[in-house]
Image (cartoon, helix red, strand yellow):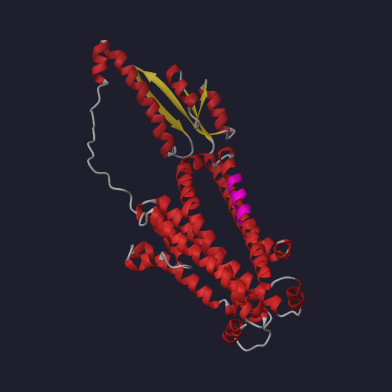
Amino acid sequence: MNKIWLVAKETYRREVKTWSYLLMILAPFLLVFFSFVIGMVSAGGSDDNYDNYVGVVTSNSVLKQAIKKSEDFDNYSTEAKAKKAYKDEDIDGYVLIEQKNNQLAATYYSDEKMDSDLKSELLTSLNTVQQQLNLSKAKLTTKQTQSLATRAQFKQQVKHVEKKSFDNDPVKQISFWTLLIILYMLVITYTQVTAQDIATEKGTKIMEVIFSSMPGGDYFTGKILGIFGEIITQVLIYVVGFVAVYCAAPYIDGFSDLFGQYKPMIDQAIGNLASWGLVFTIIGLVLFIIFAAFCGALVAKSENANKAVGPLSTLMLIGFLFTVNMQSGGDTIFTKVLSYTPFLSSFVMPARVIMGNATNLEAAISALIALAATVASFIWIRKIYPNLILQTDDVGPWQNFKRSLKG
């Protein structure tokens, strides 16, 4: 067992120290960082044009309190002070509000028209105060005032609430595409890495020395564990990065409001991904990696590794494209069959669950079938792996495979 972990450690250490692995890890963070910087610079440019305030000059105490609570307006005690602030470009303009014969009159002074949102906010405050002045002038009784405040009633009696379809549910859409892209990228990356690593080792004489000191099956187990360790490291780094952003987002200026608005949606999407999506991603990755190692062991030259792993890449592409097509194709019989087929089930079944077309029982059955296929494949390939690795004759993958079966 110690030798298995030694092989796993060496496989893991050798790969994580490469520049290609480091760049693969950092690429998403660099993309997010530069996108954030560009967004902040753009927002900064916009802020220069839109973040100035509008001054308000009024003697009405109620209006002053309303303006004080606003983030877009500033109170000025006199028109002279407002003019000076406007001249110094501290404000975009100022509003002079006068009260004559119990009527409010507001005049805006500036080089350009007031923004429509600011105008709407100001008019809301003005109309509220004007309504109070009108009621005061009318000298209504308390009962009459309450009668004027009476509003129409509106009730709903809903007998059937239609559930959101997949096309109209943004949470399901986000979960669907996030799961699909993550699985696709991990599978396409690590099948190539695994096949190349195995094929490179096969071309060296050191394998005979290694197999003389430990069983070939144990060496295969160590290789798979080491490669899976690389995947876990990458995923954990991304998870830590996401958690850090998730926790810091409420405290980032200019981003906290947007995050608060979409936080419930993000939480639901995480829940979708952390359930069956995670289970099928792990099982699918292990299954693809096992067969990628098998494909790498079939070739005699490392440059042929990409060709050997071609069938796996095709199978993965079929699963990806078919799952994408599920959005318009619906939950057909063919879809249901593929959701129980190892390799393809890792793409199809979690997508069916997210779309609401499969129950937890169906997902559990599919996961058990995929797990059984993974275990059986591992045992079988582990058994023939030594015979495949020690064959260095360039007679083609099929001939090497037949020789390994003969022992």
Residue 244 lies in what quarter of the image? Answer: top right
Visible residue check, residue 293: no
Q: Against 10, is 109 above or below?
A: above
* Residue located 62% across and 48% down the image: 240
Query: Magenta residues?
Result: 235-244
Left or right position of 57 against 141: right
Left or right position of 101 against 115: left
* Residue located 71% across and 65% down the image: 11
Q: Specify whether residue 237 is painted magenta.
A: yes
Judged by its main secondary structure, the magenta piece is helix
Q: Specify whether residue 369 is painted magenta.
A: no
Q: Quadrant of the C terminus?
A: bottom right
Position of residue 76 measured from the top left corner of the image (x, y, whole percent): 52, 23
Left or right position of 174 against 35: left
Q: Quadrant of the N terminus?
A: bottom right
Position of residue 87 measured from the top left corner of the image (x, y, whole percent): 57, 33
